[in-house]
Amino acid sequence: MGWFHPRGSAPRPAVSILAKDDGRPAGAGVLLPRQHLLTCAHVVNSALGKDMLAPDHPGAVAVSVRIHGPEHTVEADAELTAWIPPRRDDGGLGAFEWNGDLAVLRLAGALPPAFEPPRWHPMARRQFVRAWHGSGEPGVFADAEVSECDGRFGYFDGAERTLDIEPAYSGGPLWSNEESAVVGLVTAKLRVRGELRRAWGIPWQRVAWELRSAGVDHLLPRPDEDVRDHPVYAELTTLLDGPLSLSDGWVRCCRAVARQCGLDHRADGTPSADEFARLLLTRGRALPALVEAVRPTAGPLADELL
């Protein structure tokens, strides 16, 4: 974990996919860039009152969603734009797991600036993850440990003294606090005998592959390692490692950026130039917040940032 890190362990905003008949949560979802949402296809089927694993494209439909931000909640309709059905024809649908099962939805209007998509990170064995109920309530969560992941399926076992993962968790993020990122989507609980509470999900590795195959890879978040290839990355890190970090009130500026981005920070020190550059290039609110914080004491440096 770096100098910047999420507040608590809840990735906000939280996305609720609502059932058409009664408005109750059919499942959850995750924000993607450009006013898009990602969830499981079976969650959309459930919201529409269809058989959950029905592979047929639902057509030009929209579902009601509720997006819970850091300070307020937005209710809207989201139109289905990409359908990746549960697949039976490639050996992926068995008694317990299946391939596909993703849906991309698009909101009609832009969200407030504070509603930003989370980071993603590959799922791996022994990661501790947290899943939230589709209601979006921050206290209704289940903790688990990834017991196995082959990049196609991820299995996770519920911790002691934690809630069990039930259907309304489906489509929601599997959040790794250590990685400060989403590592996959909750898909289903394994109904097997015994005391072990095991569920499975779609790892980020397969989410990315499925979205590319469906032709919507433009919605994939930019991988962290690609930030170094950004045309202004080198110039930005040089500025952050030199003149900016030596300016008056630099610690105050760093903390102001964290606050404006809805992040927490370490009590001591400041972020490295690399970490700060990554934040500025991946969080829309970060650069304006830094310019605003720096300008009162270092106007020329603020102009260089622009």
Image (cartoon, rainbow, N blue to C red):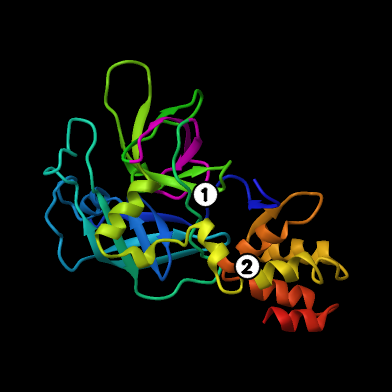
Q: Quick one: label 1, few (<14), some, or many (20+) residues within 10 Å?
A: many
* Residue 165 against residue 9 in the figure, above or below: above
Q: Nearer the viewer, residue 229 or 104?
A: 229
Left or right of 86? Residue 179 is right
Q: Nearer the viewer, residue 141 or 11?
A: 11
Residue under the image location 43 percent in, 66 percent down = 33
Which residues lie in the magenta part? 126-151
Q: Does the magenta stretch include residue 150?
A: yes
Q: Residue 302: where, in percent of width, then height?
A: 75, 80
Give the mark toward the camera: 2 or 1: 2
Left or right of 142? Residue 246 is right
Q: Mark 1 points at which residue?
A: 181
**N-terminal of the two: label 2 or label 1?**
1
The quarter of the displayed image where residue 77 is located:
bottom left
Q: Mark 2 points at which residue?
A: 280
The answer to whether residue 31 is seen in the rendering is: yes
Q: Residue 289: where, in percent of width, then height?
A: 68, 72
Count the marks.
Answer: 2
Residue type pointed to by label 2: Leu
Residue under the image location 20 percent in, 52 percent down = 45
Residue type pointed to by label 1: Ala
Q: Does the magenta stretch include residue 5?
A: no
